[in-house]
């Protein structure tokens, strides 16, 4: 009889332990419609900026600790907000062309976290694989997670993804037509 109680207690303890562990690991779906991604690209003579839409995303948590995540961006949703009319349409068309993001062939860009390191209270250093224009490269950035949202500023070197147009890394004598390789993404994810 004592052996049956011991086995029953052991089974209940094991079931409770694994049940609690499964409950603590959770996936939070990002509200793509409420989230925002603002891009900024700079050149020798100025800069341009706009927005791009998130298709889907998730953050993986164990309790209150971030452990992973992944996101998909709709490259065809790219807008230009610093100029209007004909010039905005021309720039948007050029950014979507093969000179830049090749949206007809590569309509989505993705990010998958490969490493998450806690830096402080709700602040994490993320390393992830970005896939842009069919090429995958790692990038590292800080992500601040708070109640209802997560924010990050991400710097991406476009030359790593075969985006060479106007880059002094590939062309000489560009003068004031040079476009810097790094572009910035200010990301606000609504949870």
Image (cartoon, rainbow, N blue to C red):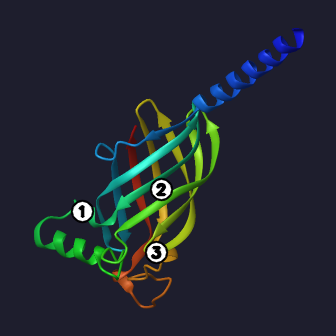
Residue 71, position as x, y percentages in the image: 44, 54
Answer few, some or many: residues within 10 Å of disc 2's Cα (few below 14, many 20 plus, some between 14 and 19). Answer: some
Q: Residue at x 48, y 75 (%)?
A: 161
Contact flag, marks 1 and 2 (Cβ < 8 Å) = no
Q: Is residue 181 above or below residue 63?
A: below
> In front here: 3 or 64?
3
- The local secondary structure at tag 1 comes to loop
- For this orientation, the residue located farthest to the top is 1
* Image side of residue 24 versus residue 51, left or right: right
Residue 139, position as x, y percentages in the image: 56, 61
Residue 82, position as x, y percentages in the image: 22, 61
Q: Residue at x 60, y 47 (%)?
A: 125
Contact flag, marks 2 and 3 (Cβ < 8 Å) = no
Count of marks placed on residues: 3
Numbered tag placed on residue 134 in the rendering: 3
Residue at the disc numbered 1: 79
Badge nearest the viewer, 3 or 1: 3
The mark nearer the N terminus, 2 or 3, is: 3
- The local secondary structure at tag 3 comes to loop
- For this orientation, the residue located farthest to the front is 1
């Amino acid at each position: 009889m004592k052996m049956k109680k011991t086995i029953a207690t052991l089974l209940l303890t094991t079931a409770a332990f694994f049940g609690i562990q499964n409950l603590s690991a959770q996936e939070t779906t990002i509200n793509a419609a409420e989230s925002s991604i603002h891009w900024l690209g700079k050149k020798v003579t100025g800069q341009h900026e706009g927005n791009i839409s998130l298709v889907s995303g998730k953050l993986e948590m164990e309790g209150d600790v971030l452990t992973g995540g992944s996101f998909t961006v709709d490259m065809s949703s790219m807008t230009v907000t610093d100029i209007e009319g004909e010039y905005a349409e021309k720039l948007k068309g050029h950014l979507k062309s093969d000179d830049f993001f090749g949206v007809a062939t590569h309509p989505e860009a993705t990010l998958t976290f490969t490493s998450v390191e806690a830096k402080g209270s709700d602040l994490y250093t993320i390393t992830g694989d970005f896939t842009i224009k069919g090429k995958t490269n790692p990038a590292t950035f800080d992500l601040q997670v708070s109640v209802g949202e997560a924010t990050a500023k991400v710097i991406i070197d476009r030359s790593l993804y075969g985006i060479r147009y106007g880059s002094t890394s590939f062309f000489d004598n560009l003068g004031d037509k040079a476009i810097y390789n790094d572009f910035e993404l200010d990301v606000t994810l609504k949870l």
